[in-house]
């Protein structure tokens, strides 16, 4: 039995065609049901649907053998017990610093609203810039507008969300895409099975 962890939303949408090409299908009936454990076209493979940020947690603890997760989420979670074995190149975006204008970044202590606390700390520590982080769980773009922070660190794709809120992308922290992560113990005990799926997905990327 193999359990794969996926998150709802854009990662699921972009992963399903990859799994299909690799020989694993999930019916619309399963996808449209309210079930969190979905049956697949193969009896010995199940898919669980969870929050994006929970995917590395389930995989780390072996509740899923492997999962697909954004690099942004993995950088926050840490690599403990996880093997990042494949870059799927899907759900691409950039982690960036954004503000209403460049001058806003000139502060002795820069106030930053973000949910990416670890990546933000690492980036500004390397630059030697003193910061104060205001941890938010969403709608980061709002923070500079209402004076909660000088800038934000968030994912940017088209840039439309920033623009709509009067913000501009200023500094590029890292390119993001989704990665296939494997539970380290599963990779030993179910090595052939997991390698089979990694290779099948890889062949069709
Ligand atoms: O809400 P929940 O925590 O359950 O998950 P989620 O809503 O964050 O999930 P979802 O489906 O949005 O997928 C999140 C994953 O997709 C992230 O972890 C990234 O790896 C990846 N991804 C790729 C993105 C984007 N692109 C993206 N543009 N995740 C979020 N965004 C958001 C961004 O935060 C901003 O609000 O889209 C907005 C910017 O988009 P543009 O096109 O206006 O620049
Ligand atoms: Mg969301």
Image: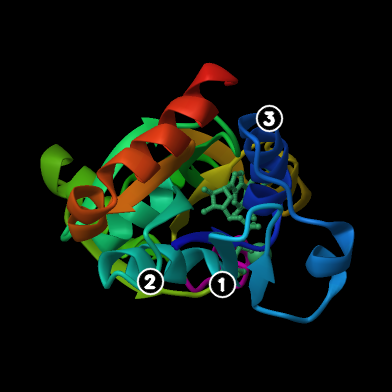
Residue occupied by mark 2: 58
Residue 155 location in percent, x, y? 53, 47
Which structural element holds mark 3? helix
Q: For this view, does 28 lie left or right of residue 57?
A: right
Which of pointers 2 and 3 indicates the residue nearer the eye? 3
Which structural element holds mark 2? helix
Q: Residue at x 53, y 30 (%)?
A: 201
Structural crowding at the residue carrying mark 1, measured as other residues with C-alpha within 10 Å and reported as few (<14), some (14–19) or many (≥20): some
Q: CA distance from mark 1 to mark 2?
A: 9 Å
Q: Are marks 1 and 2 in contact (CB under 8 Å)?
A: yes
Q: Which residues are magenta?
A: 139-148
Residue 140 location in percent, x, y? 56, 65
Which of pointers 3 and 1 indicates the residue nearer the eye? 3
Name the image quarter holding residue 149. bottom left
Residue 39 location in percent, x, y? 68, 66
Which structural element holds mark 1? strand
Res. 21 mark: 3
Residue occupied by mark 1: 50
Q: CA distance from mark 2 to mark 3?
A: 25 Å
Structural crowding at the residue carrying mark 2, measured as other residues with C-alpha within 10 Å and reported as few (<14), some (14–19) or many (≥20): some
Q: Are marks 2 and 3 in contact (CB under 8 Å)?
A: no
């Amino acid at each position: 039995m193999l359990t794969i962890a996926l998150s709802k939303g854009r990662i699921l949408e972009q992963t399903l065609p990859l799994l299909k090409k690799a020989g694993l299908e999930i019916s619309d009936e399963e996808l449209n049901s309210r079930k969190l454990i979905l049956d697949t076209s193969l009896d010995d493979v199940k898919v669980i649907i969870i929050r994006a940020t929970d995917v590395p947690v389930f995989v780390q603890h072996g509740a899923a053998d492997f999962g697909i997760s954004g690099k942004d989420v993995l950088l926050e979670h840490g690599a403990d017990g996880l093997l990042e074995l494949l870059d799927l190149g899907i759900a691409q975006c950039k982690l960036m610093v954004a503000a209403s204008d460049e001058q806003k970044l000139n502060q002795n202590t820069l106030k930053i609203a973000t949910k990416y606390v670890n990546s933000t700390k690492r980036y500004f520590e390397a630059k030697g810039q003193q910061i104060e982080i205001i941890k938010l769980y969403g709608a980061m773009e709002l923070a500079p507008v209402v004076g909660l922070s000088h800038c934000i660190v968030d994912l940017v794709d088209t840039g439309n969300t920033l623009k709509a809120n009067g913000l501009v992308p200023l500094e590029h922290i890292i390119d993001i895409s989704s990665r296939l992560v494997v539970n380290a113990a599963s990779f030993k005990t179910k090595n052939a099975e997991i390698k089979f799926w990694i290779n099948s997905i890889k062949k069709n990327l």
